[in-house]
Image (cartoon, helix red, strand yellow):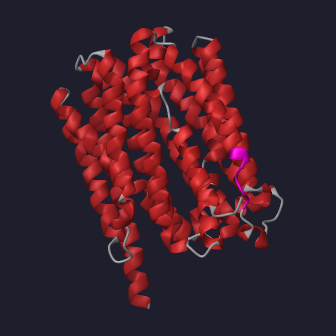
């Protein structure tokens, strides 16, 4: 199998990994086992923290030992986590399962984008990265959309059935990952095998390279926004009394929306308007949460859809921007630093959001999200715009 087949294999792998029949009802599944919404969000904080703890080392491992091997390990850990979800119950068992899935997520994060980018770099198709990444992300969203419809109907029969089916689907990801071909581009300049080398990449991304620093901070704000929305969509549906059978259909619609804009995200990614586009996206995201807070009703679904549309645009654009400002030998590590900051941010915020929802209201939770996301994303976009203006003036 040639290197070019990596693109098709990554499309297939994304489709399988994102065929999440459990996601439309996962919050209800946790609540079925007696967990409060605060405990559900603590579980998510544990997941995010486990991703964060292993995030940078996993990126370093991918840069050092290969993207393929790291991706294979990722699929094994994710499958193992869902085995625990399937056969055990309660807060502590779910926490352990979340840690396993979190390690799997950290091993995948950065490795997949780095493998795609280096494959295109080696085959001379680097300029198509945003388009390929956008399509890859779109496939994931379309897959999750289809899975959402199935998951909703499965849950009507049993709230446990989607979890069992999910476990079987994740098993299929392992043989797909084993067929990937490792790009050799990054091997031309292998990084030093030491903890000091990891710290050096962290220093490069967060101190020395100002553009990367603000791109990562912007990513963390958007990451908190989209992760929070994913976990509060189900409580929102429950709050406005939508029947369980429709959860999967609505979940499908949301992910289809993100996939649609992701598929066309390359049309928004131009050198001339990139930082201004990030500012517009930041303002739109914060405003959407404000309007959502005002509309805890069926009408509010419109604003949830709009948030998912924004998510589809911003993710591929940010990944491409980070790749363009990073050399091949440290690319997976830098992408992992990005995910590390996102996950740490969400791990800090998630229990707070859960507490606000349990003890106050979803309205207050969404207003809080609007403030946090708005401040950090808008500030980052302004700083990025200034850096671009300085670079243009200097040239």
Identify the residue at image location x=31%, y=62%: 279
Q: In this rendering, does residue 37 appear at all?
A: no
Instruction: Determine which quarter of the picture holds residue 193.
Output: bottom right
Q: In the image, residue 57 lies at what x, y percent?
A: 72, 49
Instruction: Determine which quarter of the picture holds residue 93.
Output: top right
Q: Quadrant of the N terminus?
A: bottom right
Q: Measured along the vertical axis of the image, is residue 191 above or below residue 257?
A: below
Q: Is 161 situated left or right of 256 in this image?
A: right
Q: Is 224 situated left or right of 108 in this image?
A: left
Q: Is residue 136 magenta?
A: no
Q: In the image, residue 211 lies at what x, y percent?
A: 49, 69
Q: How many marks?
A: 0
Q: Main secondary structure of the magenta part?
A: loop
Which is more toward the observer, 51 or 101?
101
Q: Residue furthest bottom?
A: 395
In magenta, the rendered stretch is 177-182
Q: Measured along the vertical axis of the image, is residue 185 above or below residue 310?
A: below
Q: Is 25 situated left or right of 72 in this image?
A: left
Which is more toward the observer, 285 or 84?
84
Identify the residue at image location x=67%, y=51%: 56
Q: Is 381 situated left or right of 190 in this image?
A: left
Identify the residue at image location x=47%, y=15%: 29
Which is more toward the observer, 82 or 202?
82
């Amino acid at each position: 199998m040639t290197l070019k087949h990596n693109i098709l294999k990554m499309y297939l792998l994304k489709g399988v990994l994102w065929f999440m029949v459990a996601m439309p009802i996962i919050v209800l599944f946790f609540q079925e086992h007696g967990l409060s919404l605060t405990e559900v969000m603590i579980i998510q904080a544990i997941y995010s923290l486990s991703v964060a703890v292993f995030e940078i080392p996993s990126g370093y491992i991918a840069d050092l030992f290969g993207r393929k091997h790291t991706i294979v390990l990722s699929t094994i850990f994710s499958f193992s986590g869902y085995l625990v979800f399937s056969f055990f119950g309660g807060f502590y068992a779910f926490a352990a399962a979340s840690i396993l899935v979190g390690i799997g997520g950290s091993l995948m994060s950065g490795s997949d984008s780095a493998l795609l980018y280096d494959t295109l770099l080696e085959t001379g198709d680097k300029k198509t990265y945003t388009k390929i990444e956008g399509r890859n992300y779109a496939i994931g969203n379309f897959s999750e959309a289809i899975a959402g419809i199935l998951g909703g109907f499965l849950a009507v029969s049993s709230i446990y059935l989607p979890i069992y089916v999910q476990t079987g689907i994740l098993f299929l990801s392992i043989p797909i990952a084993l067929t990937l071909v490792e790009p050799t581009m990054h091997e031309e300049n292998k990084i030093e095998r030491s903890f000091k080398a990891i710290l050096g990449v962290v220093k490069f991304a967060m101190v020395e390279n100002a553009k990367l620093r603000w791109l990562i901070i912007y990513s963390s704000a958007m990451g908190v926004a989209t992760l929070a929305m994913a976990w509060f969509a189900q409580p929102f549906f429950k709050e406005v009394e939508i029947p369980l059978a429709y959860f999967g259909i609505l979940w499908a619609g949301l992910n289809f929306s993100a996939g649609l804009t992701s598929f066309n995200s390359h049309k928004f990614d131009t050198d001339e308007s990139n930082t201004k586009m990030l500012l517009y996206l930041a303002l739109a995201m914060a405003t959407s949460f404000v309007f959502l807070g005002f509309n805890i009703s069926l009408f509010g679904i419109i604003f949830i859809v709009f948030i998912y549309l924004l998510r589809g645009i911003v993710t591929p654009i940010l990944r491409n921007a980070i790749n363009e400002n990073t050399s091949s030998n440290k690319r997976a590590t830098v992408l992992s630093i990005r995910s590390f900051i996102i996950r740490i941010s969400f791990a800090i915020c998630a229990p707070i959001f859960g507490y606000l929802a349990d003890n106050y209201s979803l309205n207050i939770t969404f207003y809080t999200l609007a403030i946090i996301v708005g401040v950090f994303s808008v500030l980052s976009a302004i700083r990025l715009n200034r850096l671009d203006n300085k670079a243009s003036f200097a040239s």
